[in-house]
């Protein structure tokens, strides 16, 4: 398993990539996620990432319980006053992160580095990089840099750890020569192998996928034109399919919307006036009345109606006044001669309440709605719909058409005469 550790945002916290033996691919993870884990091979990357922020953006004071942070580009005075202190904290954290990254390796740790170093602890340009704390363990003393041992299980390296030099100049006296350099003694002895860059297959074309250069090369004009013709034919077929698929085979519309326009219907709707001006109005009251009339048996007496209305009233959160008015309305509706006929139809199984209906109009639109009461008395069909609007006059024609649509649908389905009634309750 290989682990590649790179730097990420936040003061440049490193990330890691894992390559499991026998698998294809590399997985990235942060150094913090790699804590407590161990891998045969660990590769540190993104080495130019800074070990700490140049300008701290927060200050923590545990004694005072204070946390001052940058906000909208502005720094609190506490951050400015303690900038040096916070920078030191960031550097200390960076050292800890580098230690964690380096100690994840079980067998091999790979650290990209610069072969030329005149300081003895790493190049000055790299002093602020996140892997800088490891340099003192990587760079051999200057007097030993040109006399490494042969690295076992490695190819033969050249004399220079720098790939290309201007005018073919030779390595400098402080350049680390590729090979195995020994450090420490006794139980603390270890080797650092400085790899020769000439042995790396740098710039090798990938053996997979299509290279960008191949995509940009000019192809055979006849072949290109042939494929363009095929593509255009495919595109035309696709466009026709999209246009055909975007046209609905059926257009739906609710009865409420359909009744807003003038319709040529043979059925005439008769209006039954039962509303009292002193009772409550509004959407909640209308829902309460409809729910009560839909649930109460048609042969119910006043106590039965009251029981149903009280239950529905609790469901809708209705007031006592609304519940009392709904009871009065429902009792009056059930006593109407038309509802007496509907009750008789119940006995022969030909009365339907809250009946879903649909009607295909002349323009192909499928209109759908739910009729309150539909029944057959042995001679003809009857449709009844209830309305509780306070200002019924403004929508009367629309409501007439709505009930007429229901009646027309029932008439066409049963191939029989159907009459329509609008109960204004």
Image: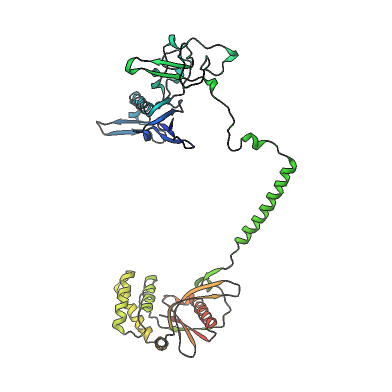
Where residue 181 sits in the image (x, y, percent)?
43, 15
Q: Quadrant of the C terminus?
A: bottom left
The answer, for residue 307, to whether it is visible in the render is yes
Name, please, the residue furthest toward the right. Answer: 222
Q: Quadrant of residue 103?
A: top left
The answer, for residue 7, to whether it is visible in the render is no
Is 154 left, or right, of 278 in this rendering?
right
Q: Quadrant of residue 341?
A: bottom left
- In the image, residue 124 sits, relative to residue 394, either above or below, namely above
- The one nearer the camera, 364 or 17, is 17
Where residue 226 sits in the image (x, y, percent)?
72, 46
Residue at image coords 54%, 76%: 359
Where residue 112 sits in the image (x, y, percent)?
46, 23
Name, please, the residue furthest toward the left. Answer: 63
Where residue 189 sits in the image (x, y, percent)?
36, 17
Q: How is the image coloured?
A: rainbow
């Amino acid at each position: 398993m290989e682990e590649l550790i790179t730097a990420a945002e936040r003061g440049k916290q490193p990330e890691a990539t894992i390559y499991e033996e026998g698998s294809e691919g590399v997985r990235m993870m942060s150094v913090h996620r790699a804590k407590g884990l161990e891998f045969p091979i660990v590769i540190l990357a993104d080495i130019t990432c800074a070990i700490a922020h140049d300008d701290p953006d927060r200050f923590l004071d545990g004694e005072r319980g204070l946390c001052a942070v940058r906000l909208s580009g502005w720094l609190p005075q506490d951050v400015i006053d303690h900038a040096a202190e916070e920078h030191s904290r960031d550097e200390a954290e960076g050292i800890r992160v580098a230690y964690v990254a380096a100690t994840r390796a079980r067998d091999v740790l790979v650290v990209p580095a610069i072969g030329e170093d005149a300081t003895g602890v790493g190049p000055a340009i790299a002093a602020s990089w996140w892997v800088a704390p490891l340099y003192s363990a990587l760079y051999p003393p200057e007097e030993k840099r040109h006399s490494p041992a042969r690295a076992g299980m490695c190819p033969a390296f050249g004399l220079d750890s720098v790939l290309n030099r201007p005018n073919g100049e030779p390595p400098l006296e402080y350049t680390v020569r590729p090979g195995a350099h020994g450090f420490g003694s006794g139980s603390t002895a270890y080797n650092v192998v400085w790899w020769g860059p000439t042995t790396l297959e740098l710039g090798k074309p990938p053996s997979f996928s299509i290279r960008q250069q191949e995509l940009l090369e000019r192809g055979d004009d006849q072949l290109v034109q042939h494929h363009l013709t095929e593509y255009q034919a495919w595109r035309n077929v696709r466009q026709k399919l999209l246009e055909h698929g975007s046209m609905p085979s059926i257009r739906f519309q609710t009865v409420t919307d359909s009744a807003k326009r003038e319709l040529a219907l043979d059925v005439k709707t008769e209006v039954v006036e039962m509303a009292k001006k002193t009772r409550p109005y509004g959407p909640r009251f209308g829902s309460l009345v409809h729910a009560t009339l839909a649930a109460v048996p048609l042969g119910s007496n006043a106590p039965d109606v009251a029981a149903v209305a009280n239950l529905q009233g609790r469901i809708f959160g209705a007031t006592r006044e609304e519940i009392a008015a709904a009871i009065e309305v429902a009792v009056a509706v059930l006593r109407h001669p038309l509802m007496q006929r509907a009750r008789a139809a119940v006995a022969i199984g030909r009365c339907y309440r809250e009946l879903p209906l649909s009607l295909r109009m002349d323009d192909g639109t499928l209109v759908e709605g739910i009729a309150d009461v539909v029944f057959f008395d042995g001679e003809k069909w009857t449709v009844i719909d209830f309305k509780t609007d306070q200002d019924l006059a403004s929508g009367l024609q629309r409501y007439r058409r709505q009930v007429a649509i229901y009646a027309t649908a029932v008439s066409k389905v049963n191939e029989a005469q159907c009459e329509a009634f609008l109960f204004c309750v």
